[in-house]
Amino acid sequence: MCGIFGAASSSHVHKDLIEGLSKLEYRGYDSAGLTLISKSNKIKRLRCTGKVVALKKLLATNNLMGNCGIAHTRWATHGVPNLKNSHPHNYGGFSIVHNGIIENFEEIKTFLSKKSHKFSSDTDSEVIAHLLEYFSKKHSKLSDILLNTFKKLKGSFALGIVYEKDPDKIIVASNGSPLLIGMGKNANYISSDINALISKTKKYISLDDNEFGIITKDKIELFNVKGKRIKRSASVTKQNTNAISKNGYKHFMQKEIFEQKDIITRVIKDKLGTSKILPNIFGPKSDSMLKSIKHVHFVACGTSYNASLVAKYWIEEVSDIMCTAEIASEYRYRTINVPKDTLFVAISQSGETADTIYSLKKAKQSKYRSILSICNVAESTITRLSDYSYLMQAGPEVSVASTKAFTSQLIALLLLATTLSRASDSKLESKIINQIKSLPRILSKTFELEKKMQLIAKQFKNKNHTLFLGRGASYPIALEAALKLKEISYIHAEGYAAGELKHGPLALVDKNMPVVGLMPDNNLVTQVLSNLAEVKARQGLVYIFTNKKMKLKKNDKTNIISMPACGHYIAPLVYVIPMQLLSYYVAINKKTNIDQPRNLAKSVTVE
Ligand code: AGP
């Protein structure tokens, strides 16, 4: 997703801008740029397609310096990723960087073109610079120019603006897209992401929707949409700086796959007693709120949505609570019936996914009993908008492909299911806790499959399609496995409920089609085996992940990957590990950009 960074300081900031952008690269982008206010109070801009390192070289050759500036990494929404569409956009002494989508940009563009404005890009963002110039001709006070401009904008925006007539100031504005102000020593900073601030300062202020600010090196003024000054206390982030490093691994994804066991060990230490979950782990008084819940609506995107599907199986199995799991981009436009005592749960690693944010805002206008979020970023928009929040504390997940966040979400959701089970089966809690406590040992054994997955991955290198099959709570794991393989190896993959195979996908199966069956030894083994037999009868390449002891006939070419025995409830967390490893090693063989796959962004902050 786009990234914004800016600095106003008593010293030169050009290096800070590059360093800030480098901390935002993990979000995914295709061009970068910056503007500095020169000694002669002129806006000096540099932009390039490609990586931040190219912008750094451009900066060095142009020898640009200044004490106030803004910078941006762009993930293209409106307008292809080329130079003219990259940010910052300049007009009439203003230079702006934008994250979000201006929904009424064509209308503004038409209005200003009639006033002989010439546009140089195909972006929505550029209209903001032109509007600022338009209102600067009608108002002399900066706040009037800003208020009139922001009032015209419809849609989501996080903005960083510099203006030649106020050369030591950075103007910020936010609506539906996050923007933080970092409070430094003889300097203040702006960023769309806490990760870019923590090497400068841990003290920050978050802008809320429809707020704007004027920042200098030693002053921060905040205003609401009516231009009234507002007070906002500073927060201090607990995040540490070395979280954004590979610690010797080849890729962030590899590091984050192997961090999962330690993260789960930490959850066990922090959240579990001997045979009970510690009180109120979902926020103050959350236990009593959860006692009143009769229905749960999960809303999420991508991997987080797959986690919510697993939770639906768990909760409906251990309680009499009805659950729905909805894709946020569908939920936000659907008519939703909210029965009495329904809990809304937003699941999001970044806490900044636009569709999930809009769904949560819609939920806040509905009759939900409460809103709970399960997030990995404490200072995120979704956390701030929720009544209750559970922080996964998985550490920053840098690789676009989500791995440790997924299993951290699953653990949180299993603890939620267990808490909700108390009303219907008081004995279940200790049983599930014991299974969770066995996870570190079982995951250690599961990671021993790494070498085997490297070998199997070689067989996928030239494949164009793959099917992943599962039943019950393994079905969402099949979906997650397919998403992983798709997004980092670019091989088309689908996850399917195994029972659905004969309702269509079986037509795809031939001797070139790998079919991966996830088959924990449970009550559905017979059914999964018969589905896989349908594949074998059509010479499909079958890979079965199971802890069931299986004897194959002599010429049966089925690949059996023996999994460690594990408890019924924790099987999804165990079976996803070889799927993550498989997709990682297939991507290694295909030499793709594993941590920043093409076209993808880490946090999709636009719809
Ligand atoms: C998963 O590997 C992807 N990176 C993507 O599907 C992601 O899970 C989705 O965009 C949701 O992100 P969030 O959890 O930050 O809301």
Image (cartoon, helix red, strand yellow):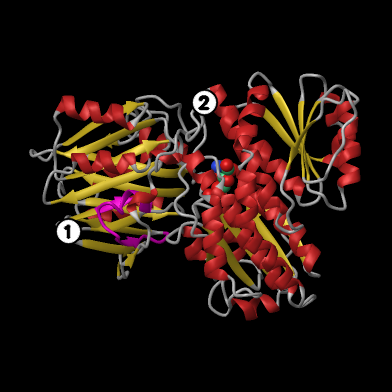
Which quadrant holds the N terminus? top left
Closer to us: 40 or 474: 474
The magenta region covers: 189-209
Q: Is residue 102 found left or right of 182 in the rendered image?
A: right
Sequence order check: which comes first, mark 2 or mark 1? 1
Closer to us: 517 or 296: 517
Q: x, y percentage for residue 501? A: 86, 35
Closer to us: 307 or 368: 307
Quadrant of picture, ligand 1: top right
Is residue 445 shown to the viewer in this render? Answer: yes
Callout 1: CB less than 8 Å from ligand 1:
no
Which quadrant holds the C terminus? top right
Instruction: Report the amino acid beneath label 1.
Output: Lys
Picture quadrant of residue 217: bottom left
Residue assigned mark 1: 185
How packed mark 2 is, by other alpha carbons closer than 10 Å (few <14, some 14-19, many 20 or more), is some
Instruction: Report the amino acid beneath label 2.
Output: Thr
In the rendering, which numbered label is found on residue 459? none
How packed mark 1 is, by other alpha carbons closer than 10 Å (few <14, some 14-19, many 20 or more), is few
Residue 208 vertical placement versus 34 (above, below): below
For the residues marked 2 and 1, what is the alpha-carbon distance in whole angstroms?
Answer: 41 Å
Is residue 145 shown to the viewer in this render? Answer: no
Residue 248 vertical placement versus 142 (above, below): above
Q: Nearer the viewer, mark 2 or mark 1?
A: 2
Residue assigned mark 2: 592
